[in-house]
Image (cartoon, grey):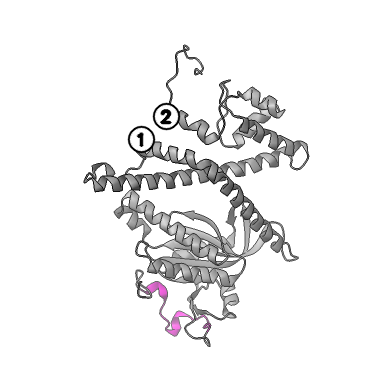
Amino acid sequence: MTEPGSSGAEPTRRPSDDYTEQLLGRPLELRRRDVSRGAEVSLLSARKFWHALGFPVVDTDDELFTEADQKALSAVAGIVRDGLLDEQTALAMTRAFARSADRLAGWQSQLIAEAVEAHMTAALEEEGDTAEGETRSVPSTETATETARRLSALTDRLEPLLVYAWRRHLSATVSRMLADADPESYGMTKMRSVGFADLVNFTALVRRMSERDLARLVSRFEALSADVITAHGGRLIKTVGDEVLFTTMGAAPAAAIALDLVEAMAQDDLLPDVRCGMARGPIISRLGDVFGTTVNRASRLTAVAQAGTVLVDATMARELASLSGFELTGQRRRILRGVGPVTPSLLRRATSPARRSTSPVTPEQGTPDPARRDRSHPEPRPRT
């Protein structure tokens, strides 16, 4: 197959061509007109679908598509024809699949590449040759080729897991939606406990660590955070390098997550301390993310929290005050940027069943302000 405008000479075959059909699972034997004709849609509709998937518009008649492309287009067109979704919603749904799949593919490819790189580095070190094992910002040709080979071998085995995970998460999402459908709910707004966990001194760590060590640290943080959050029934909304955002239906699970995250990071030899900020109130969900004043308040509280501590807003403090297992200490009133005045409380595990919380205090009463304590070790604890 020659490129448009070429003289007809045999094209140079790229290494990626050897794995394309393996990963797609079917041969590239259809042109764009074949796909649209087989799906019984116009070229314009086919182009909209392809663009919604996140790929550039194809203007050539080369054989770039497979039977799977035709079936996928037929499925979306059938949903519209049967009246289950209008075209705009169907394309938005396709876009949601595409954005998630793009991130998933990049994430999984990076995981495999890191595993391959680590194996190659270990082999070089055994041979006494570490010159080629230095950190690279881009995988070497050997790493990329081996990663492609492994992914080609894993695709058929991983595909059922993808469908299973999607169905499970879809079920959990619908359950949350039904739980929110009560007389006090309105529109897309719902009550949630929102929490942020932020690694302390991450910027300084980035300057000192190699790319490989930094990747290992971020992966460890994401994995450990996900384990803690899901163990308490929370939902991990997103991770952004040194920070995770999570939500829960109730206040108690969120408090347990924040306290466990602080302890887990303190006991981990690789990770620095973490600080958490939490708020409770209405949120807005959109495109898999959450927005609103409650989210902003939790974020700002995280920014003013000290290493190894958890700050909660007044709404969350009131709900936790009636529960055993938690101890709340009122802090001085603060003006948070973009949020306004907030009187946070410091959350700890209860040291005594009889003592759950203390009333908010003012600086004049002489209670030490956590903001004046040493940021690196505000509450010393033994590491295991």
Residue ID at (36%, 35%)? 141
User: Label 1 belongs to which residue?
Assistant: 141
The three-letter amino acid code for the residue at tag 2 is Pro
The residue singled out by tag 2 in the image is: 15
Position of 277 with respect to 168 (left or right) is: left
Q: Is residue 267 left or right of residue 78?
A: left
Spatial CA span between label 1 and label 2: 10 Å
Q: Position of residue 369 (x, y in %)?
A: 42, 76
Badge 1: residue crowd in 10 Å (few <14, some 14–19, many ≥20): few
> Considering only order in the chain, which callout, 2 or 1, is on the residue closer to the N terminus?
2
Tell me which segment is drawn in magenta: 356-373
Residue furthest bottom in the image: 354
Check if mark 1's residue and mark 2's residue have beta carbons within 8 Å.
yes
Q: Amino acid at mark 1?
A: Thr
SS state under label 1: helix
On the question of residue 135 being in view, the answer is no
Magenta region's main secondary structure?
A: loop
Q: Position of residue 10 (x, y in %)?
A: 45, 16
Vertical order, 341 against 17 (above or below): below
Q: Dot 2: what SS?
A: loop
Checking the image for residue 128, the label placed there is none
